Amino acid sequence: MAGYFSNHSQSRLLANRDISSNSQNNTPSPSPVRTAPPSASRRQPSSKHFATSLTTSGDDKLHSKEKSLSSASSLSPGVHPLRNTWVFWFRQQRAPGNKITNYEEGIKKISSFSSVESFWSLWTHLQSPSALLPTTDYLLFHLGVRRPVWEDPLNITGGKWIIRLRKGIADRIWEDLVVAIIGDQFDECKLDGGKDESILHSAVDSSIGNGGDNVEWPEICGCTISVRQSEDIISIWNRVDGDHKVREKIRDTIRTVLNLPPSTIMEYKSNNDSMQDKSSFRNSAIDRTPLS
């Protein structure tokens, strides 16, 4: 696996970025948002749906506002709307000796986007994973997920696929994964409408109180990248843990969109198991299904 990934260069989209970084000596907790160069300081966002400021409070009010912006995006000329509105989150870096006991306390909302243009406006201002200090996370979830935690109503019945990456190759993998998810490349990874699947889907909707909302959320809830000292970990969260066929479709799609080699080790863990052992990645099940 290491040999394969070492042959990959960064994405052509990342190649045009400003790879210089500010000094870290005086910045114990770096912001995930890039500081724009002087020549770009007055650049206007390409979409009115792009929020230029960080948002750390008033989540419910912003949630309602984002729904209105999402519905209005189809009326804006020159804007290419996404099927769903997506929200970027950032988990603050924990300084040694100052461990955050409540996971949610460290999660901050960065911004939301609902069009191709607003995504790239935001993406080009975010620090790449390789520029983040260890023990920090990026989280991307669709608007239906109010908080990117196991206990959220849309996450609680699901789980996640996990891939561990050696240091130095996460930037390209993370970008490819994010673009694939918001670009609906996982759209076929859903319940196929059979009798058993319909019963399961109804049970899930009932458990999260979504029976009368008439909202069809995607099977993929979101994805995360966790920057650690010796490795980077990406995870793809899905809505229904109990359907093995859907899980297999997601696994195969991940392998395709990320162009993973046959030797790649993939793991899966349900959010229920994570809540039981209070861990995202420990005690996960290793998938040993051979590539067809």
Image (spheres, rainbow, N blue to C red):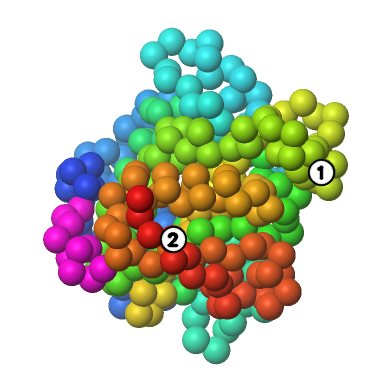
Residue with the most extreme bottom position: 97
* Residue at the (43%, 25%) spot, across then down: 47
Establish if 130 lies above or below 39.
below
x, y percent for residue 142: 58, 41
Question: Is residue 6 magenta-colored?
Answer: yes
* Between 109 and 150, the one nearer to me in the picture: 150
Determine contact: label 1, label 2, CB under 8 Å: no
Residue 150 visible in the picture? yes
Looking at the rendered structure, the kind of residue marked 1 is Ala
* Residue at the (34%, 68%) spot, across then down: 165
Q: Nearer the viewer, mark 1 or mark 2?
A: 2
- In this figure, which residue is indicated by the disc labeled 1? 203
Where is the N terminus found, in terms of image quarters?
bottom left
> What element does badge 1 sit on?
helix
Question: Is residue 277 magenta-colored?
Answer: no
Establish if 86 lies above or below 139.
above
- In this figure, which residue is indicated by the disc labeled 2? 289
Is tag 1's residue or tag 2's residue first in the polypeptide sequence? 1
Looking at the rendered structure, the kind of residue marked 2 is Thr
* Between 262 and 268, the one nearer to me in the picture: 262
Compared across the picture, whether 83 is left or right of 203 comes to left
* Residue at the (49%, 45%) spot, across then down: 249
**Magenta stretch, residue numbers:** 1-10
Compared across the picture, whether 177 is left or right of 210 comes to left
Q: Which quarter of the figure has residue 253?
A: top left
Mark 2, Cα crowd under 10 Å, few <14 / some 14-19 / many 20+, is few
> What element does badge 2 sit on?
loop
